[in-house]
Image: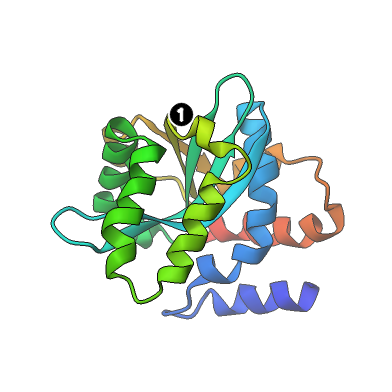
Amino acid sequence: IRLVIQRLHRNRKFPKYQLERSIDGFLALFLEEYLALHFDAPVTYVAAEFPLKKAGNNQSTNVDYLYLKTGSSPQWIFVELKTDPYSLREAQLHLYAETSATMTMQQLVQQVEQAILPKSKRKEKYRYLLEIVRADGRTNVLDAPIHIVCITAHPPDTRLRAAYPQIDWVQLHDLAAKLTHTQHPELWHYVKELVLSLGEE
């Protein structure tokens, strides 16, 4: 694990390296625990790369992670992870904010089923996605509100924060500071080291 983390440290300095995809398997494990602390409620991982249909065509913008907060006030949580400040796109933020304000997960699932799936060459993957979202009794919370969490390595632009107050902005170093206890301390020791280094440049 130490060798893998060291390699990630090195690779992230290369111009075309997509660190967010490379650390997915490590960090996603701890996002669930962090979100449970953040919301003070049980949180369950649901899916990665959940598609939001673009207006005017059947293409999509994909949310990095989809979680479900259960308990007395269920919520669907869109999580966007940005380790590079230059990858934070306002058009993407606008779509997330507009979607959370105007649509339910029920409508998004129908959109995937009726508009995206029929046009896709990988229909089995979209069917699997729909099956997962609808599974385990989740159909009774498909109309729960959607909450957006944007996790960044660097402080987001103050203009963006002001323009999108409905987005829950979290910095990785705050996440690391709050996640003092975890079910996987031996792995978190290495991942935390990487997480804290991301905002240094």
Write the residue at 68% across / 32% down.
Answer: 42
Mark 1 is surrounded, within 10 Å at the Cα level, by few (under 14), some (14 to 19) or many (20 or more) other residues, namely some
Q: Position of residue 49 (x, y in %)?
A: 46, 59
Name the outermost residue toward the right: 186
Q: Position of residue 143 (x, y in %)?
A: 42, 30
Residue on which the image places disc 1: 144
In the image, residue 168 above or below residue 52: above
Q: Position of residue 191 (x, y in %)?
A: 72, 60
* Relative side of 136 to 3, left or right: left
* Relative side of 6 to 158, left or right: right
Q: Secondary structure at mark 1?
A: loop
Quadrant location of the N terminus in the rendered image: bottom right
Write the residue at 47% across / 68% down.
Answer: 125
* Relative side of 140 to 191, left or right: left
Name the outermost residue toward the left: 56
Write the residue at 83% across / 53% down.
Answer: 184
Write the residue at 86% across / 58% down.
Answer: 186
- Give the quadrant of residue 163: top left
Q: Amino acid at mark 1?
A: Ala
